[in-house]
Image: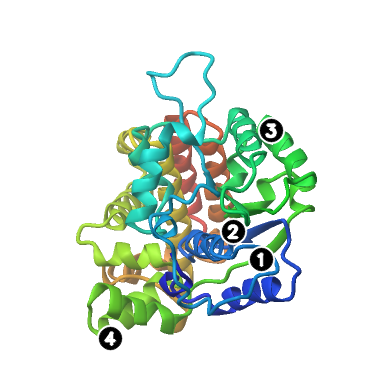
Amino acid sequence: MTFSEVIGQKEAQERLMQMVEEGRLPHAMMLCGPMGAGKMALAIAFGCYLLSRKSESSESSDYSDYSESPMLRKLEHPDLHFTYPTIKLPSMSADHKPVSDDFAKEWHELIMDGPYFTMDQWMQAMGGENQQAIITAGESDDLVRKLSLKSSQGGYKVSIIWLPERMNIECANKLLKLIEEPPQQTVFIMVCEEPDKLLETIRSRVQRIDIKKIDDESMIQALVEKRGIGEEDARRISRLANGNWLSALEELQIGSENEMFLDMYISLMRLAYQRRIKDLRKWSEAMAGYGREKQKRWLTYFLKMSRENFMYNFHQEELTYMTQKEEDFAKNFARFINENNILAISELANRDIRDIGQNANAKIVFFDLALQMIVLLLQK
């Protein structure tokens, strides 16, 4: 995989290449940024570039279209190691700690299909949509074993760690020791969305590189070239996606998840406004039937839609990012989200995202949310 397959992010690419060319490549770095910005795509492209070099002192080629070996094209290079959250399947023994190699086939199929994907897609690939995926202590032991081996090609060894914030504490402590005393010619590239959840001792030992949202022109160009849509439609989708390629792909899908999320949002608000407690209980039970990852995504959508409805009251088009269907609802509803309740609504959503992530009872979480909205919608 080359940098030419990364959508936008030219500034980040230049920074990475400059570190290599100036001989100051850190042994551990962390790419941080919003979902859909292309952090994983950038990490894989950079990892492939490093593996295409024989050593730190070798000449650098044109990184935009450097030639790849068949192993790199297929992402099967023996010195390229992936670490990612996993789940425990019923077929696994009680004392087995799941590791990435348990799902190597599913992972390879996913990334070969494209480096832009969601946790939900990964959960579906593993066959465990209702579980919480983590990186176990067994993974760190496995990584120590792999990286202790000499490079098979005489160059770098690259370890790409997707969502290191999902490491349990035992794994995080073991990884810390590995980062403090890294094997020779080893580069760790962490792809992180919530760096604050990582141990401070790990954050302090890696070089953080913040990845911005994809710029509009790169997004439009990718939509036209990769998806074959007209430039005008590409501009509209780019604006709605707001720098998130995954959101852009969702906009292209008929009957996307966001439409269902909007229906659940509208249902909640109407039932709360009408104080229909029995129906709100049924609503909360329906929400509890979704997997936890989907519940967290809906809460994130709830947070976004509440913000968009609040901004809609200012009647400035450049401040809002809604589909036509979302805007049609906002025309009559937006006045109920105002300066008196927007902060409380935001705090409520963030609390519920945290609680769902900590395996709280979903029925209780969503019924409480529904009851709280009855009160908050009255605050005009």
Q: Nearer the viewer, residue 79 or 257?
A: 79
Q: Residue at x 61, y 48 (%)?
A: 151
Q: Residue at x 69, y 33 (%)?
A: 169
The numbered disc on residue 323 is: none
Q: Which residue is mark 4?
A: 231
Q: Residue at x 65, y 57 (%)?
A: 30
Determine the CA span between mark 1 and mark 3. Answer: 24 Å
Determine the CA span between mark 4 and mark 2. Answer: 37 Å
Sooner in the amino-acid sequence: mark 4 or mark 3: 3
Q: Please identify, in this view, whether the residue under mark 4 or under mark 2 is nearer the observer.
A: 4
Give, as a three-letter code, the residue at label 4: Glu
The numbered disc on residue 343 is: 2
Q: Residue at x 47, y 34 (%)?
A: 101
Sooner in the amino-acid sequence: mark 4 or mark 2: 4
Q: Is residue 305 above or below residue 5?
A: above
Q: Residues within 10 Å of mark 3 (few under 14, many from 20)?
A: some
- Circle 3 SS class: helix
Q: Residues within 10 Å of mark 1 (few under 14, many from 20)?
A: some
Determine the CA span between mark 4 and mark 3. Answer: 47 Å
Give, as a three-letter code, the residue at label 3: Ile
Left or right: 307 in relation to 14: left
Q: x, y (%) of residue 379? A: 52, 57
Give, as a three-letter code, the residue at label 1: Ile
Q: x, y (%) of residue 58? A: 65, 70
Give, as a three-letter code, the residue at label 2: Leu
Q: Which residue is mark 3?
A: 169
Q: Please identify, in this view, whether the residue under mark 1 or under mark 4 is nearer the observer.
A: 1
Q: Is residue 321 visible?
A: yes
Q: Which residue is mark 1?
A: 209
